[in-house]
Image: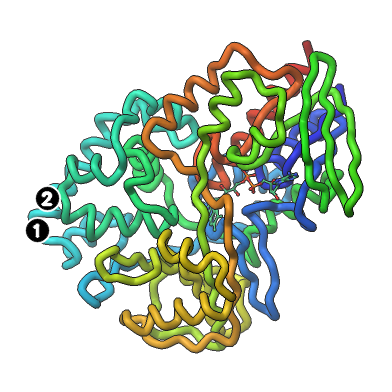
Amino acid sequence: MGSVVVVGGGVAGLTCAWRLSRAGHDVEVLEREAAPGGRMRSEDHGGYRIERGAQFLTRGYHNLHAIADALGIGGSIRSLGRPRDAVLRDGRLHELDFHAAGHMLQSRLLSGRAKGRLLRLPIELLRQRKYLDPLHPERAACLDRENLADGLRRLVGDEAVEYLLAPVFSSRFATEPEELSLAFGLIVLRMLAGDFQLEAFEGGNGALTRALAETLRVRCGCRVTSVETETDGARVRYEKGGRSGSVFADAVVVALPGSLVAAVCPKLTPEERGFFEAVRYNRGTIVHLLLDRRPTTLPYYGVAFLRREGLDLYGLAVDHHKPGVVPHGAGLVNGVLNQAATERLWDASDDEVGNLVVENLTRTPVGRLAPVDCVVHRWDPMLPQFGVGYLPRLARFSQRMNRSPRSAFAGDYLVGSTTEAALTSGMRAATEIADQLRT
Ligand SMILES: Cc1cc2nc3c(=O)[nH]c(=O)nc-3n(C[C@H](O)[C@H](O)[C@H](O)COP(=O)(O)OP(=O)(O)OC[C@H]3O[C@@H](n4cnc5c(N)ncnc54)[C@H](O)[C@@H]3O)c2cc1C
């Protein structure tokens, strides 16, 4: 058994720390923010429970479910039933049910010809299924040759991409489909075609990271400035409350967003450095509108907007459909700004951003909402960008021969842009460290 420092208290780092400490190691988590949880945290605003980051889980998140059960909180995961989604086209919201092919065929969102071509998608998923594992994206490295927009156009044509797939991907990943790879998109579609029943923790998804952190020694407000590993252990330097400190442990797990790793780890091997310097995240803005009643115009859970509608938003998520997040009868809606608006308004006031979202929605069938408050979260980094060429780099990184000693890495960029993926990376890092400390 040995001592381990985990740098970063998001779901990846906390899962890793929890596993190692259950195995008997002496573990400490160092987290920069005042509270652990990272991009899976819930916060209260006068009776409204707002998600900082992850908004939903799915029944297919098997590792997350197993850990929630082990922590005794699995019973507070609630299904969201069959929430309907919608896409805005030509000023009308078209309802969609991704689980019912018949529903899609009846929808007037797409022409008959586009619906016919869309059938090529399940055929492609079936053809490539052996490469499409949501928890092993590197297995799809051989498919990673073109961007998502071009690849989908080739498969299903312009109309289905423009009016259905691009808005759905953009509203979920807060980016343009040109920024993602087709290989990544196929993995996501494979996930959607599987056990994709939406769920959430009653009272907020932060329940999971909170429960993990409660079992651990977590030092918050502690910004790690450097991690140096040697064959006998790791030196971690940090700043806390304006003072510098350092800790030496038998091993370290770096559980930071991948784009931050190279800056804090000066002794990476050249292969590792090359990989980390090419990891990209987008930045994004989520605007939560707190409403004193539920708008009747939003019976949907997710609403996606087309680029050509000219709005500043990729989409909306209607959070009040989740259990225990708003006062009785109240409403909670969040909007995802598109990339252009995020860049334009990065330094704008929260009021300005909130007003922009309200004004945008008056141009849609959602109509004028009158929020009692508005909470803006600006994320940088937000989500890892699985762009063209990333999966072969990830595959090479996973199989690298030259590894920094006494260390492992965890984070969503290693598996996928979800809590399940981040948590799985934490589980794997725990196994890696336990093996290193045994030898
Ligand atoms: C707006 C948004 C919506 C999302 N929606 C969903 C969703 O609905 N469903 C889903 O499954 N996933 C969703 N995700 C993705 C999911 O939340 C993330 O993939 C996951 O939480 C990432 O966990 P992580 O531990 O890898 O990283 P993080 O949570 O980012 O953890 C890294 C931690 O490191 C800390 N840190 C950074 N620098 C330092 C330093 N120098 N020293 C010490 N600590 C440091 C950070 O404060 C952070 O706590 C969403 C993400 C965002 C941002």
Residue 184 placement, left or right of 113:
right
What secondary structure is marked by label 1? helix
Q: Which residue lies furthest to the left in this view?
A: 113
In the rendered image, residue 287, in percent from the top left (x then y), is placed at 53, 71
User: Where does the N terminus fall, quadrant-wise?
Assistant: top right
Foreground residue among 397 and 204: 397
What x and y, as percent, mark residue 249? 86, 27
Amino acid type, residue under disc 1 in the picture: Gly
Q: In this view, does 74 lie above or below 136?
A: below
Circle 2: residue type: Gly
Q: Quadrant of residue 3?
A: top right
Q: Residue at x 56, y 88 (%)?
A: 292
Residue 199 seen by the camera: no
Query: Residue 25 in the image: x percent, y percent?
Result: 84, 29
Q: Decide: few, some or many residues near mark 1? Use Cα within 10 Å; few <14, some 14-19, many ≥20.
A: few
In the rendered structure, the answer to whether residue 82 lies left or right of residue 87 reads right
As helix, strand or loop, the secondary structure at mark 2 comes to helix
Q: Residues within 10 Å of mark 2 (few under 14, many from 20)?
A: few
- Tell me the tag on residue 116: 2
Which one is in front, 108 or 348? 348
Image position of 65 (left or right of 25): left
Residue at which label 1 appears: 112
Q: How far apart are marks 2 and 1 (CA)?
A: 6 Å
